[in-house]
Amino acid sequence: MSSTSTVIREVAKDVWTFSCPFSRFNVVPVGGRSTAIKMINGDVWVLASTPLNDVTKSKLDEIGPVKYIIGADAVHTLYIGEFKKAYPRAKLIAVQEAISKKQNEGLLFDGAWGADPVGTEYGFESDIKHCYFSGFKNKDVAFFHPASKTLIEADLLFNLPCNEQYSKSPSSGKVPFVGTLNPYTWMHKKFTWAAGVDKEAMKRDVKTVAGWDFERIIPCHGDVIEQDGNKAWREAYKWYLD
């Protein structure tokens, strides 16, 4: 992905997003986004979901030493290898399904949601909380940064169209036919319900995230929700919470 199409923004103190165009099946524009958080001790935590191009790496190196590289679910695995190659001393942590998918690349992982015991801590918990959705189709993990009241996630919640992610691209970020997929639509509720392969596990984890005090949601796909994020989460997962 060209550096010229990457939008880098400090969305809150010590929280940066790296947004760029990405189309599912090369047809549906859903956008891509990585998120970096500078922890209290100066180390950098990165949810790696977009290419490590020149501008991304330059900004990360400016923020501080990358200590954690995160694979957020079973399908956001394209770029974790190049992040690990660039930052070999960083801890690479992902869900077990992602690790299985990348086993031929010889990557060394330092943690695996879905394989490690429930409650395992990886070293960043004083800054960032996490909740593994074992009952979600893509085995996603939700992350909460209390200092900025921000929720970070990959496929648990969408906010399309992806205007920011296509703002430096000649292509449109509008979704054909559908137009909008945000937490307040019936279609999003239908999506989250269908993606729950274990409804009881989903109810448990949805409630955990709903109990976090966040205002902002940074999704991998679609525009950042800057306010009323907890309300948006509860609306998207209303069928699990009712």
Image: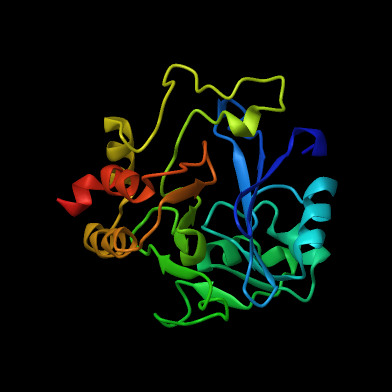
**Whole-percent x and y of residue 140?**
45, 58
> Residue at coordinates 41% horizontally, 67% vertically from top-left?
131
Nearer to us in this view, 84 or 114:
84
Question: From the viewer's perspective, is 61 left or right of 102?
Answer: right
> Residue at coordinates 46% horizontally, 65% vertically from top-left?
146
Nearer to us in this view, 138 or 7:
7
User: In the orientation shown, which residue stands out farthest toward the front?
Assistant: 13
Nearer to us in this view, 64 or 24:
64
Nearer to us in this view, 45 or 49:
45
> Residue at coordinates 41% horizontally, 21% vertically from top-left?
178
Looking at the image, is 95 positioned above or below residue 52?
A: below
**Whole-percent x and y of residue 110?**
63, 78
Looking at the image, is 16 positioned above or below residue 28?
A: below
User: In the orientation shown, which residue stands out farthest toward the top?
Assistant: 177
Which quadrant of the rendered structure holds the N terminus?
top right
Count of numbered circles on the image: 0
> Residue at coordinates 59% horizontally, 61% vertically from top-left?
71
Question: From the viewer's perspective, is 6 left or right of 126?
Answer: right
**Whole-percent x and y of residue 15?**
61, 56
**Whole-percent x and y of residue 120?**
46, 82
Which color scheme does this rendered protein use?
A: rainbow
